[in-house]
Amino acid sequence: MAIIQIKRRTSSGTGPIVGTSGSIKAGEPLVDLNGGNLYVSKLGKTGSSSNPILLTDYLEYLSKPNATSLIDSKISNLSLGTASKRNTGTTNGTVPLIGADGKLPTSVIPNISPVTSVNSKTGAVTITLSDLGGVSTTTYNSHVSSSLHLTDTQRTKLNNIRNVSISQGVGSKFVTDKSTFDNSIISNAISLYNVLDDNYTPAKMVYYLGIDSSKVLTPTSTIDGGTY
């Protein structure tokens, strides 16, 4: 009985005939006994340096082991999780689907009313400031100058705050720059002292201002013209 054998690779390497040598016929099958795949040539072609035979010149049919390996690699490359192995449904271990109403099945998430009660109101209600325990703008404005909304500590701190100003009196003047000020004063004539008083909350800084008595002329002072 005659035996028909198709082209087959039995030597080293894998794949069909490729390269610059050899020839194939359109529809000719080639089996790779090493790699396990079947190839069918798309067209008649003789390989040359300018027109080599390529893998794209064939239709490739994978063997079952190679197909399984390729599918497993694809699943791994896509990083598919466990959900891809679950059936759809609403029972334990299944993945529920959103229905035509855009919601999950009621057996998974029951329908609930968005608002059940607000101050004895039901349904779609308008919530006012008073419903939230607030006061009206008019009531708030009437207490703007009040300290009722402050804590005792806050009131104490505010009560310890004083408005302070220094005004120009008779025999004094205000100058417009620091240089003029420095040239107008008597060196070391003004004495300053400050102390922090912890009896206040917050603590109060007290400044004491005085004049050096040695820089003040008195009825017994001597004006010395100096010598030369």
Image (cartoon, grey):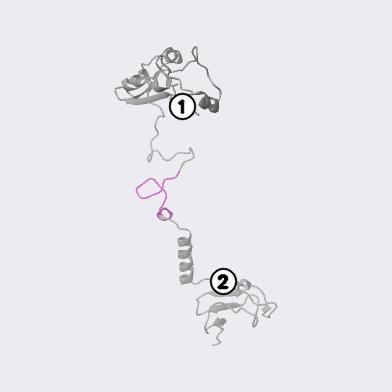
Identify residue type, mark 1. Ser
Residue that protrudes farthest toward the front in the picture = 228
Where's residue 67, x and y in %? 49, 68
- Graded by Cα atoms within 10 Å as few (under 14), some (14 to 19) or many (20 or more), the crowding at tag 1 reads few
- Magenta-tinted stretch: 82-97
**Quadrant of the image containing the N terminus:** bottom right
Q: Which quadrant holds residue 144?
A: top left
Task: Place residue 198 in its image quadrant.
Answer: top left
- Does residue 183 belong to the magenta stretch? no
Q: In terms of depth relative to the viewer, which is nearer, 20 or 199?
A: 199
Mark 2 / mark 1, whichever is N-terminal = 2
Q: Is residue 212 visible?
A: no
> Residue lying furthest bottom in this view?
1
Q: Residue under circle 1?
A: 187
Which is the main secondary structure of the residues drawn in magenta? loop
Q: CA distance from mark 2 to mark 1?
A: 105 Å
Label 2 element class: strand
Residue 158: percent from left, percent from top: 37, 19
Task: Name the kind of residue labelled 2 in the image.
Answer: Glu
104 above or below 57?
above
The answer to whether residue 38 shows anywhere in this view is yes
Residue 60 numbered mark, or none: 2
